[in-house]
Image (cartoon, helix red, strand yellow):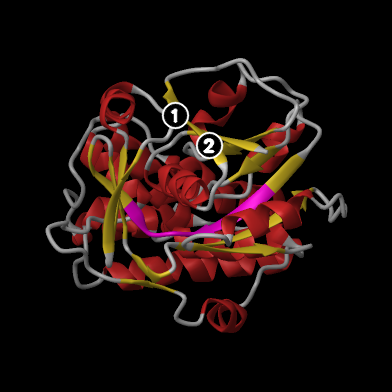
């Protein structure tokens, strides 16, 4: 198979690099300065223990496809539809993305859809360079067919290919249960982006997660427990420092730092808001985080620019409304 990684940023680029190192044919799809650097110099993958430049083919848009192609979609959720629009709908698509809405969006057009729960801390310190901070493996990736566990063998084959070099691939029949658990973890992304790591930020995050757990349980949506996650993860993907690379925040923090103009809060905190509205449950913490993260992205505010007291006051006002 050839793996076409659509959105070869920090996560997609690491997955593509590790597949390439494992002997697989890979094509990276990227944009702007990152694409130009990949095309000119190759992809430089930096980890806590190594640095290697890989001559992986790259393109800045759709290419002629083959019957054995697998699309790995690693864009932000708000870019899913536009990113997949030019690609043939008969190819399998793996949604290597945060949130739980992408698979259903993709299933409207593509028949063969696979969810991927991504545990992979990485960033792009400069165009063409990816710093993957986890050790001893760069990431752990749960893969499964969506919407149900159809045993077509492809999820297991993808998981095996991922596991050949620097990653842990796991074929699972209940991939969305793992993705809902990851969603709970990602609810703190907006708070981190807005506040930075200040005292009081963890309390806001825990309030958002408590709100979300209540909504998920009311809706009857299953999610993997922290104990299950800890057992599976062990110490296989522990984040470590990389000499010469300052580690920034998570994906939402990085969106504000780049001045991207958009952020994935609608598909993280917004997923809980949506479920709350469907089931008649209030979600003031997640609604405030969703709204303020979007505002910060639109206004291109830097990460950590909101005082904790301001956010707390907005949540209190929303709770009282």
Q: Name the residue under label 2.
A: 26
Q: Where is residue 215 in the image (x, y as percent from the top left)?
A: 64, 63
Residue 107 as seen in the image, left or right of residue 317: right
Residue 303 as seen in the image, left or right of residue 45: left
x 26%, y 25%: residue: 33
Magenta-colored segment: predominant secondary structure: strand
Rate crowding at label 2 as few (under 14), some (14 to 19) or many (20 or more) other CA atoms within 10 Å: many
Q: In which quarter of the image is residue 39?
A: top left
The foreground one among 3 and 227 is: 3
Distance CA(mark 2)–CA(mark 1): 7 Å
Q: Mark 1 points at which residue?
A: 57
- 49 w.r.t. 320: above or below: below
Q: Do the residues labelled 2 and 1 touch (CB within 8 Å)?
A: yes
- 299 w.r.t. 213: above or below: above
Which quarter shows the N terminus? top right
x 37%, y 46%: residue: 10
């Amino acid at each position: 198979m050839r793996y076409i990684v659509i959105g070869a940023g920090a996560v997609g680029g690491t997955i593509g690099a590790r597949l390439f190192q494992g002997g697989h044919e890979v094509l990276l799809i990227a944009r702007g300065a990152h694409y130009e650097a990949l095309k000119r110099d190759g992809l430089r993958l930096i980890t806590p223990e190594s640095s290697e430049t890989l001559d992986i083919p790259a393109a800045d848009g759709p290419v002629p496809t083959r019957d054995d192609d697998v699309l790995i979609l690693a864009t932000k959720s708000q870019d899913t539809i536009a990113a997949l629009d030019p690609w043939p709908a008969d190819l399998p698509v793996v949604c290597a993305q945060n949130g739980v809405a992408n698979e259903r969006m993709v299933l409207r057009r593509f028949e063969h859809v696979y969810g991927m729960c991504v545990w992979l801390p990485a960033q792009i310190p400069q165009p063409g360079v990816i710093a993957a901070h986890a050790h001893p493996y760069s990431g752990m990736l749960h893969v499964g067919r969506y919407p149900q566990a159809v045993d077509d063998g492809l999820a297991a084959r993808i998981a095996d290919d991922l596991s050949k070099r620097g990653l842990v691939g796991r074929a699972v029949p209940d991939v969305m249960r793992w993705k809902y658990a990851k969603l709970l973890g990602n609810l703190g992304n907006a708070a981190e982006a807005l506040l930075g790591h200040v005292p009081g930020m963890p309390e806001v995050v825990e309030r958002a997660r408590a709100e979300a757990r209540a909504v998920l349980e009311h809706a009857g949506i299953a999610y993997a427990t922290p104990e299950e996650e800890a057992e599976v993860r062990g110490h296989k993907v522990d984040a470590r420092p990389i000499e010469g690379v300052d580690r920034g925040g998570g994906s939402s923090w990085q969106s504000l730092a780049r001045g991207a103009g958009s952020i994935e809060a609608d598909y993280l905190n917004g997923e809980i808001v949506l479920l709350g509205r469907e089931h008649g449950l209030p979600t003031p913490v997640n609604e405030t985080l969703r709204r303020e993260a979007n505002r910060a992205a639109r206004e291109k505010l830097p990460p950590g620019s909101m005082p904790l007291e301001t956010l707390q006051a907005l949540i209190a006002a929303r709770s009282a409304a």
